[in-house]
Image (spheres, rainbow, N blue to C red):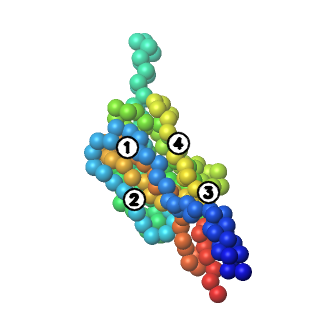
Amino acid sequence: MFSIVVVTVFLASCLAMPVKDPYSYSSAVGQGGGTPFASSGEGRITGVRVWETNNNYYYYYYYYYNSNAYINGFQLRYGNTWSPVFGREGGVKQEMELFNDEAIVEVSGKYNPADYIGHLVLTTNNGRTLSAGLPSQISFNFYPANMGNELRLLSGRFNGVGITSIGAHWGLVYMEGAGNSTGNSTSS
């Protein structure tokens, strides 16, 4: 009888799935010069602000075109509290408030390896997007490694002009009594 219990316990332990790390990181892209930053806050991200500069020069007589678009800065709101501005508040501001139970599940865009992040797109689980800058240069696409995770923070570097690199950190958000379906647990 004892050997049956031992064999059963052994087989059950062999079938157990390893626990995945609930967090993941999308490595930073961009030139990476300047001051490092990492956003942080309590709870879920509930709003985003992005400042962009779009300097497009067209000289038809000389057939010259130069697109100098970049992300100046951004700010995330956690719950009701805005983070500091990373970069600077210059240029045109784009803003998106997230609905209840809405989360950012993809960060994509374009960057110039010689200078700035030129285009930034934040996509939610409801399919809404905030798009800032102009799409040119090298593409990047960040998303969580685990199903059900969402954007927790952005990190990277900025200088006096704009964002020079950006990376995304993904994870679960545990909210008690906030009507949030992500990561809620009920206890009796």
- Give the residue at x 41% y 24%: 66
Q: Which residue is mark 2?
A: 39
Is label 1 or label 3 in front? 3
The picture places residue 61, in percent across and down from the top left corner, at 42, 12
Q: Which mark is residue 147?
A: 3
Answer with the quarter of the image where residue 18 lies.
bottom right
Counting other residues with Cα less than 10 Å from the Cα at mark 2, is it few (<14), some (14-19), or many (20 or more)?
Answer: many
- 7 horizontally vs 133: left or right: right
Residue type at the position of mark 1 = Ser
Q: Which residue is mark 4?
A: 141
Q: Which residue is mark 1?
A: 165
Looking at the rendered structure, the secondary structure element under dot 3 is loop
Looking at the image, tell me whether mark 3 or mark 4 is earlier in sequence order. 4
Counting other residues with Cα less than 10 Å from the Cα at mark 4, is it few (<14), some (14-19), or many (20 or more)?
Answer: some
Q: Are marks 1 and 3 in contact (CB under 8 Å)?
A: no
Residue type at the position of mark 3 = Met
- State the residue in front, 142 or 91: 142
Answer with the quarter of the image where residue 97 lies.
bottom right
Looking at the image, tell me whether mark 2 or mark 4 is earlier in sequence order. 2
Residue type at the position of mark 4 = Asn
Looking at the image, tell me whether mark 4 or mark 1 is earlier in sequence order. 4
Mark pair 1, 2: CA separation: 14 Å
The picture places residue 41, in percent across and down from the top left corner, at 42, 66
Mark pair 2, 3: CA separation: 22 Å
Question: Looking at the picture, does residue 164 appear above or below residue 7?
Answer: above
- 145 horizontally vs 26: left or right: right
Q: Are marks 1 and 2 in contact (CB under 8 Å)?
A: no
Q: Are marks 3 and 4 in contact (CB under 8 Å)?
A: no
Question: Looking at the picture, does residue 102 appear above or below residue 157?
Answer: below
The picture places residue 167, in percent across and down from the top left corner, at 43, 48
Mark pair 2, 4: CA separation: 19 Å
